[in-house]
Image (cartoon, rainbow, N blue to C red):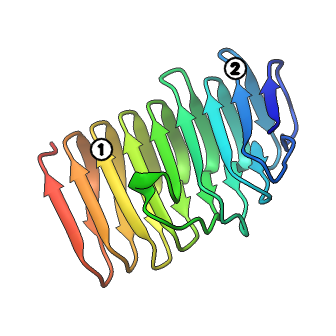
Amino acid sequence: MTTTTINTNRTTTQTPTDSAAADIVNLLLGIAITSNGDGIDLGNKGAWTANIDGSISATSYGMFLMPGNAASSIVNLSETSSIDATIGMVVGSSATGAASAGGGVTINNAGSIYNADQAIRLNSTGAHIINNTGMLVGALAGIVAFNASNETVTNSGTYSNLFIANGTNIITKTGFVQGSYTGGTGNDTVTNAAN
């Protein structure tokens, strides 16, 4: 296991050390990544835990969990975090298994992902959990899932449109939704107490 701590401002894409073990990357409070490209690219050798307390500004992807990674990963974005990018976060990981049992990919967002075409793009099959207490706002959508993956989204914050493709999806909305929910084929459960 390798831990990479980003503790000074950076102006290029960050590629933390990637090993077959479960690696950790920390972006510290008050630290900014400003990149003409991606902000942070997480490799595909093994599981990741990303703890984001600082800010990312990127002309491409704010964060990119690369394809070919079948290990379970977790991304934690604190209340002090922000991502301003063309696409805030792209999950290419194909991690499977019951996300509620520690499989798949889990994103816990208490910060802000904004000024994007899409705040979060799920580009892979597999299982994904998104817990949003912050803001996920994109011109196209807050969350987009293109493949037949299983999504569990719990929102008590704010997000814009939600586009989910085929799969078994569970959506619970108690916060503010700017837009609509569009689902594909599959068994979807939507609980809506949102404003």
Picture layout, residue 32 above or below residue 139 = above
| Residue 135 visible (yes or no) | yes
Between residues 3 and 139, which one lies in front from this camera angle?
A: 3
| Residue 141 visible (yes or no) | no
Q: Which residue is farthest bottom?
A: 185
Q: Residue 8 carries which label?
A: none
Please name the residue shown 57% across and 45% down the image. 74
Residue 22, horizontal then vertical, whole percent = 72, 45
Please name the residue shown 73% across and 19% down the image. 31
Residue 44, horizontal then vertical, whole percent = 77, 60
Three-letter amino acid code at disc 2? Leu
Q: Which mark is residue 28?
A: 2
On screen, residue 2 versus residue 96, left or right, reads right
Q: How crowded is mark 2: few (under 14 residues within 10 Å), some or many (20 or more)?
A: some
Q: Residue under circle 1?
A: 155
Between residues 23 and 143, which one lies in front from this camera angle?
A: 23
Quadrant of image for the C terminus: top left
Residue 66 placement: quadrant: bottom right
Three-letter amino acid code at disc 1? Asn
